[in-house]
Amino acid sequence: MTERDRGRRGNRGSTGFRDGRPSKPEKAEQPVDPVAEAREICLRLLTARPRTRAELHQALLRRGVAADIADQVLGRFDEIGLVDDAAFAEQWVRSRHRYQGMSRRALAVELRRKGVADPLAAEAIAAVDSESEEARARELVRKKLRSMASADELTKIRRLVAMLARKGYSEGLAYRVVKDELSNAGLETELFDDAVPD
């Protein structure tokens, strides 16, 4: 080994550390408080986005927190307002309807999957009346229609109805809205009956 190589590697003493210094002594592991750990998990999850009590409970159980500890922590979060399924449902409905165009039926399914109780979900969904639901469906169709200039009429009908169906709109509403919007855009609707399944 040349002098140059020694300089690159540094002066390692018998301890194996650069300049012979020992590493920092390791701290003895502190016993983990399961309540504090559960609280920390919940706070981290809530920092990312609002969550329902059921979502937090499932996350705690997946991370090995005992069910009684999870219930205790979530009960305290309920008391201080950090977990509020009613507020979550209202915010979810407002956001998903406005920005994603989801129908009331689709919103009910999403809230059920997130663990929101049916009465709370129904109350939040009631904020979307049938008129606003239809108006939102029309906006979605108009927006999509602008990007479908090269498609033939039958393809437009099928794609528009399928888009509304994926967002949870009923078949009757979807066909009526698509037919009206195609007519308003001055497009042929004679093929519409061919696109409607028997």
Image (cartoon, helix red, strand yellow):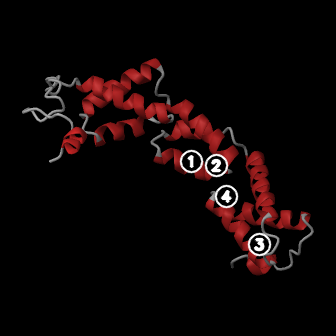
Label 4 and label 2: CA atoms lie apart by 8 Å
Residue at the disc numbered 4: 169
CA separation in Å, label 2 and label 1: 6 Å
Which residue type carries mark 4? Tyr
- Farthest residue to the right: give it: 186
Which residue is label 2 attached to?
104
Amino acid type indicated by mark 1? Ala
- Earlier in the chain: of badge 2 and badge 3, it is 2
Which dot, 3 or 1, sits closer to the camera?
Answer: 3
Relative to residue 182, is residue 75 drawn left or right?
left
Most extreme residue toward the top, as rendered?
80
Of mark 3 and mark 1, the one earlier in the sequence is 1
Label disc, if present, on residue 156 of the rendered structure: 3
The type of residue carrying mark 2 is Arg
The image shows residue 81 at horizontal and vertical percentages of 48, 21
Picture residue at 75% right of the left edge, 50% below the top: 136
Instruction: Kindly report the distance in space between the C-alpha atoms of the residues bearing marks 2 and 3.
Output: 24 Å
Q: What residue would you read off at disc 1?
A: 108
Local secondary structure at mark 2: helix
